[in-house]
Amino acid sequence: MQVVATHFNTTLSKQNQPHTIALHLDFLRRTQVGEAHFTVKDTKLGRQASVVHVTLSQAGREEVLGVITNSNILTETGVTFPTSWSLNPAPLPVSLTRLSENRDENWCLQPEMPFAAFRKATAKTDFFLPRDGQKERNKADEWIRLRSGEKWTNSSLGYVADMWPMPVEAFMREQNASDANSNGGKTKKSGTMWYPTLLLNLDVKKVLPDEGVEWLLVRVEAKAIKNGRMDLEIVILDEGNDLVALSHHVALAVPADRNLAERNTGASKI
């Protein structure tokens, strides 16, 4: 998204379409730490919206293919109706002032996300979760801010759409608790998990301020987790509970050694 923002602010500045309103990513191969090369192709340049294709490559391998639509949200016109939509069930009340000091009565800081040593990107974010746990295993709510003190912007919404408690882990905790009850209190340890995304869609509804915002509220929900594959729906709201973006994923849930294994130099596989 930052590559596309740069492209539309420089090469395509005459389009006056600085805002990504829709994004689709296909993850062909796993990425790795290190240099990445982005290639941008102008696919369709229009008066109201334009589409570009972006390819992320490493070591000569095409790893992610993106189709991104840009427009100008601030100049959009047309019919507008209130839909009265809201999160259901409603998230717990919050005081962001008290939350910043980890003193909110309903939300508390999660010291470390599961498998943090493996999922290193989670270390960039402070996750505040309900003190008494999530209401439902297939849903999770969170208030998040960047640990560095930077602010959330529209270019960081792709990261936001991929950083939350995994519903899989809630079901695994319950399963392990049941194992403990049936095995004399000895809980079966589950291995580290990897959740490779097959595809990700992002629908951006709002432009965040240029200076960014400190807090975002995120809800993730899985409707089906079956045979190691799952759907994920993500709703992102700002501090005023205004809808910022929606995201949908198709992802796998597999043992982490699938990621750590040596690369196959022949036909590529997930």
Image: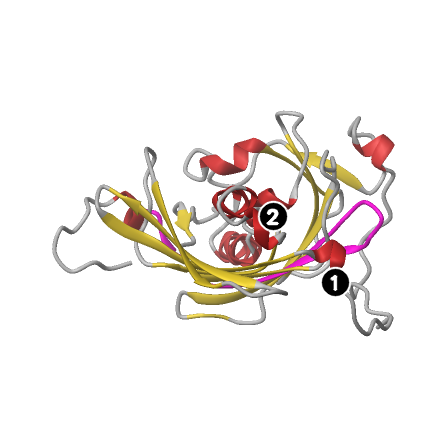
The x, y position of residue 155, in whole percent, is: 59, 44
Q: Residue at x 75, y 46 (%)?
A: 132
Q: Residue at x 49, y 56 (%)?
A: 179
The x, y position of residue 204, in whole percent, is: 65, 58
Using the image, tell me which numbered label, if any, was put on residue 157: 2
Segment tinted magenta in the rendering? 236-256
Residue at the disc numbered 1 = 76
The x, y position of residue 168, in whole percent, is: 52, 57
The x, y position of residue 193, in whole percent, is: 41, 49
Is any part of residue 225 visible from this angle? yes
Residue neighbourhood size for the residue with mark 1, other residues' Cα within 10 Å, grouped as few (<14), some (14–19), many (≥20): few
**Front-most of residues 14 and 156:** 14
Of helix, strand and loop, which mostly describes the magenta segment?
A: strand
Q: Secondary structure at mark 2?
A: helix
Q: Is residue 141 above or below residue 83?
A: above
Residue neighbourhood size for the residue with mark 2, other residues' Cα within 10 Å, grouped as few (<14), some (14–19), many (≥20): many
Three-letter amino acid code at the position of disc 1: Glu
Badge 2 or badge 1: first in the primary sequence = 1
Is any part of residue 252 visible from this angle? no
Looking at the rendering, which quadrant does residue 87 occupy? bottom right
| Left or right: 28 in relation to 10 | left
Three-letter amino acid code at the position of disc 2: Leu
Q: Residue at x 52, y 50 (%)?
A: 12
**Front-most of residues 152 and 259:** 152
Identify the image quadrant of the C terminus. Answer: bottom left
Q: Is residue 247 magenta?
A: yes
